[in-house]
Image (cartoon, coloured by chain):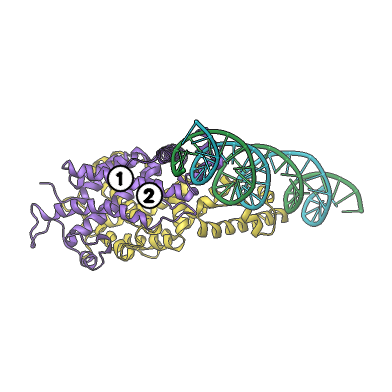
Chain colours: A yellow, B purple, C green, D cyan
Amino acid sequence: MAKSPRERYRAQVRTEIKERAWEQIATAGASALSLNAIAKKMGLSGPALYRYYSGRDELITELVRDAYRSLADTLRTAADEGAGLAGLGHALRAWALEDPQRYLLLFGTPVPGYHAPAEVTGIASEVMEVLLDASADLTADGTATPSTPSTPSTPFDAYLADHRDWAEAHPAPPAALRLALTFWTRLHGVVSLEVAGHFATMGFDPAELFSAELEALLPPAS
Amino acid sequence: MAKSPRERYRAQVRTEIKERAWEQIATAGASALSLNAIAKKMGLSGPALYRYYSGRDELITELVRDAYRSLADTLRTAADEGAGLAGLGHALRAWALEDPQRYLLLFGTPVPGYHAPAEVTGIASEVMEVLLDASADLTADGTATPSTPSTPSTPFDAYLADHRDWAEAHPAPPAALRLALTFWTRLHGVVSLEVAGHFATMGFDPAELFSAELEALLPPAS
DNA sequence: CACCGGCGTGATAACGTCTCACGAAAACGT
DNA sequence: ACGTTTTCGTGAGACGTTATCACGCCGGTG
């Protein structure tokens, strides 16, 4: 397991490059990422970075991978600490606001020339798995009986039961599939508009809107 | 009213520049917009464009303004033709899918160096006005009485009644404010993820999800 | 200790925005 | 109808980006 000093150094430089890249993304946005500027801030000159990353796309891919992993870990930790779907919602928003550009890198406008490799879908599905777990818990416990499910059954539930590639082999009932999906899209609707600054001049607190949407999403608490 | 030939020519060139810009945005995305490429396709050389637009930012501002106007006109026309809030929803999605990059230019990740001037908020509020009109119609007609509103009243409704800068002087009840706002955020959640391609490998039709969200948003039809 | 492979550099190419000085052409006033 | 003046388009250049190349150097490896 003991790596050669060469590899240790290489890995260290790669992580420092990523750190600088995150700083730059946090301030200027993902598509303004400049390998040259990173090199200059690290005290070396442009082409040196190409020893560590074959190009801008490979760096972005690794950043996307790390971001998905960070999100998955955040949600997984929250879930392990007993947070329900509501807790996951707030953890998601906190994670997004912690570094808005990181959120936009994953769920915002795709970076112009860049296309994500199939590799990242694996980690992305891990995020969905946490959501499905929490959704299944919510639809299964409490008042959930076949006759009075905690969330009303809709035609779209039936449709999803037949189009659940994204849920893979997860043992979640159709209502849980729909809940996880709408959890994602509705919260993304609020969070993405918030981090893009579209609520800035509207005169209300985005946190209030987010909480309202989250509560509307969940079955009645009592 | 008759403009000088100089101004006529100038206006014509400006619109042709915008047309080329839209073509370029539709294919490569907003942040990949290149004045040089536009000039080359128009048969003239780089710096000539600076006679018509002071820079990339001014061109983007005009594109944003036109896009907002196009969306406002589309929704306004749909509303005038008798479409309710559901019709506006489908009109919104159709408008977004017609040119995904145009939608992302307005509601997606902000363009790196660019900051929208206060001018465009006027047209943006026109979009919101159409939404508020349709929402007010829906919350006011039919079964809407003070005791049994068609949409249940929530604490967030009360909060919005006190934070309605964005609604200006529109005579919409709190429930309509909330309806218009959630209409926007929820549909944006679905549409933005769809145009960004996040549903591509998930195995279901985004149109189904969109319709389901739209129906969940509206009061029971019958 | 000698070797050689990884590492950093400068030069180069291609493309981007944007400024400037210059020449040509068109519209304007007389 | 003719000069004047404003506008337009061009080429050159400064400065930025990504990315590739040949070269020298230093350090881990045998």
Please give the name of the residue rendered at 51% of the width and 60% of the height, measured from the top-left corner.
Answer: A27
Q: Nearer the viewer, residue B199 or D7?
A: D7
The amino acid on which the numbered mark 1 sits, given as a three-letter code, is: Leu
Q: Nearer the viewer, residue B106 or C22?
A: C22
- Disc 2: which chain? B
What residue is shown with label 1?
B71
- Characterize the local packing of mark 1: few (<14), some (14-19) or many (20 or more) Cα atoms within 10 angstroms: many
Q: Mark 2 and 1 residues: CB-CB less than 8 Å, in contact? A: yes
Tell me which corner region of the image, top left, top right, bottom left or bottom right, holds residue A137.
bottom left
- Characterize the local packing of mark 2: few (<14), some (14-19) or many (20 or more) Cα atoms within 10 angstroms: some
Q: Is residue D5 left or right of residue A191?
A: right
Q: Check residue B106 in the rendering and tell me which mark sits there, or answer none.
A: 2
The answer to whether residue B117 is seen in the rendering is yes
Tell me residue A21's x, y (percent).
57, 56
A151 over B48 or under it: above or below: below
Q: Is residue A126 left or right of residue A113?
A: left
Label 1: element kind: helix
Tell me which corner region of the image, top left, top right, bottom left or bottom right, holds residue B175.
bottom left
The amino acid on which the numbered mark 2 sits, given as a three-letter code, is: Leu
Tell me residue B139's x, y (percent).
14, 55
Q: Nearer the viewer, residue B120 or A92?
A: B120
| Between discs 2 and 1, the one toward the N terminus | 1
Q: How much space separates mark 2 and mark 1, taking CA atoms?
A: 10 Å
Tell me residue A157's x, y (percent).
25, 44
Tell me the quarter of the image containing the N terminus of chain B: top left
